[in-house]
Image (cartoon, coloured by chain):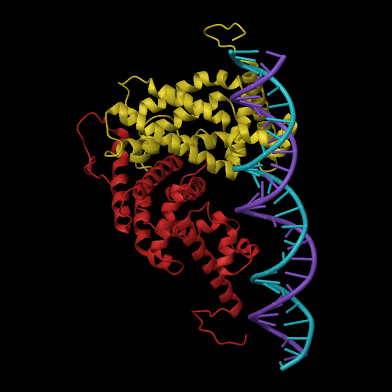
Chain colours: A yellow, B red, C cyan, D purple
DNA sequence: CACGCTAATGTCAGCCACTGACAGTTGACA
DNA sequence: TGTCAACTGTCAGTGGCTGACATTAGCGTG
């Protein structure tokens, strides 16, 4: 070991740093091209060429073109999981999931910025939602996250995931609503962090009554549906 | 018009019949190969060769390899939509969806058999669920169906889909549970039609209480969770 | 029944995502 | 400074998919 390094901030070797730079560059360029010319109209060769590496190198950093598109999303999801794991045991399952989502959004911004501009990530999300192939991948990833979430919830409640269907059911309904929220947020004009936050709270609060209520009778619970007009 | 034809059973020309046979053959062979060697390990060339047509012809019948895998699923979904459209107006949204699913399964069997053996379709469904690329496509298709469903529900209730979030929320929760049901059915050993029917009823009945209940308190509603062990 | 029209199919060339194999280059570390 | 291992480039090849063009074969007409 030639160079000195702080104990809490391990200065990695040149090799590591170079790798990191290459990866960041590939990611940034990929997302930039994806969001401007469109995912399908961007070839891996173009990305590689812009970063001045071979196409083969791209595939050494990302298993697929698709994986590059989801690199940031990946971070967001692990943040949610981390937050869910530290939710106090007293919270009911649904509340815990709800809070985990809302709290994780408090801090995710900076983490993203360390890799790519947040604004680029927002554009990327919109692109994912509007590109069939990526939407499909996104949904599959959501399902995987759903399974992890169900497992965590089951553990919290001390239930056996394979014997009791309730965790999976609740989580399925929860993520279903989250998906709808994400989609409507994307369709609306306001792409800010606050707007998705507001929408999330609003919609989650509507889930229970939406299932139970007689919609033709007067409203009986929270919020003011019919006025959000995103 | 050279040949005579019954008014209610239009005997199509030779051309049409040939096309139909080619399509059926391609579909049957494709599903058979997919379910035996696996989707990824089956090339379009192999399918085409087995039916003795060119690869180009395959792509004239199916826009993609994927489309062939979902051809039957497509039928099942339109059956659900048709059933939902004729549900009596008095039924509440959730009940209408629930009944549409259950009723559509009463008759779909024969319709499938007209194209491929039902047993082959069941195997295909299991393959879709266990093949990542197809699972992704399946989920995307489900989302599209979800949107159509939400529109129908909104119409039934006389609501504006873009102003009132409740239809989409309820439908999202509903299809979320349906997806879980399908997955667990696939994981279980019983691949019969009855078992998926039973599971569906059971799980849908659990949705509402699953969201509202305090799981640590004694059960308060239907069924006997913790004993299904599929 | 021969004819032309057109739909269905075959053939060919080519793009693009992705992979394995092998060779060259360059940090890391003694 | 030299050796090792990691990183990268090059090349050839597979498989999904498409456009262009030639060929075949139902179909209706004279």
Q: Residue furthest left?
A: B218
Q: Nearer the viewer, residue B87 or D16?
A: D16
Q: Position of residue A193 (x, y in %)?
A: 55, 24
Q: Is residue A159 left or right of residue A129?
A: left
Q: Is residue A3 above or below residue B77?
A: above
Q: Quadrant of the N terminus of chain B?
A: bottom right
- Residue A193's place in the image compared with C20, above or below, is above
Q: Count all numbered tags in the image, as a single digit.
A: 0
The residue shown at (29%, 57%) is B194
Name the foreground residue: B168 vs B192: B192
Q: Position of residue B216 (x, y in %)?
A: 24, 28
Q: Position of residue C16 (x, y in %)?
A: 69, 45
**Along the line of sight, the residue nearer the viewer: A132 or D23:** D23
**Relative to A113, B9 lies left or right:** left
Look at 31% across and 45% down and name the residue there: B203
Left or right side of A205 for B47: right
Q: Where is residue A195? Give x, y as percent.
A: 54, 27
Q: Quadrant of residue A63?
A: top right
Is residue A230 visible in this depiction of the protein? no
* Residue beneath the point at 34% across and 42% down: A214
Residue B41 visible in the displayed image: yes
For residue B102, what is the image quadrant?
bottom left
């Amino acid at each position: 070991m030639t160079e000195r390094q702080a104990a809490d901030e391990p200065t990695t070797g040149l090799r590591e740093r170079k790798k990191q730079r290459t990866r960041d560059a590939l990611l940034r360029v990929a997302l930039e091209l994806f969001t401007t010319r469109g995912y399908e109209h961007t070839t891996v060769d173009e990305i590689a060429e812009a970063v001045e590496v071979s196409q083969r190198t791209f595939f050494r950093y990302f298993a697929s073109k698709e994986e590059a598109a989801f690199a940031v999303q990946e971070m967001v999801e692990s943040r949610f999981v981390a937050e869910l794991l530290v939710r106090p045991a007293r919270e009911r399952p649904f509340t815990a999931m709800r809070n985990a989502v809302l709290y994780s959004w408090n801090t995710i911004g900076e983490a993203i910025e360390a890799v790519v501009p947040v604004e680029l990530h927002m554009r990327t999300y919109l692109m994912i939602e509007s590109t069939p192939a990526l939407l499909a991948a996104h949904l599959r990833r959501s399902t995987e996250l759903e399974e992890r979430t169900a497992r965590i919830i089951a553990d919290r409640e001390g239930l056996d995931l394979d014997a009791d269907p309730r965790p999976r059911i609740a989580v399925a309904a929860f993520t279903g609503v989250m998906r709808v929220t994400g989609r409507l947020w994307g369709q609306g004009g306001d792409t800010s962090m606050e707007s998705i936050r507001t929408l999330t709270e609003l919609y989650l609060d509507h889930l229970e009554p939406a299932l139970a209520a007689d919609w033709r009778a007067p409203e009986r619970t929270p919020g003011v549906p019919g006025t959000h007009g995103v």
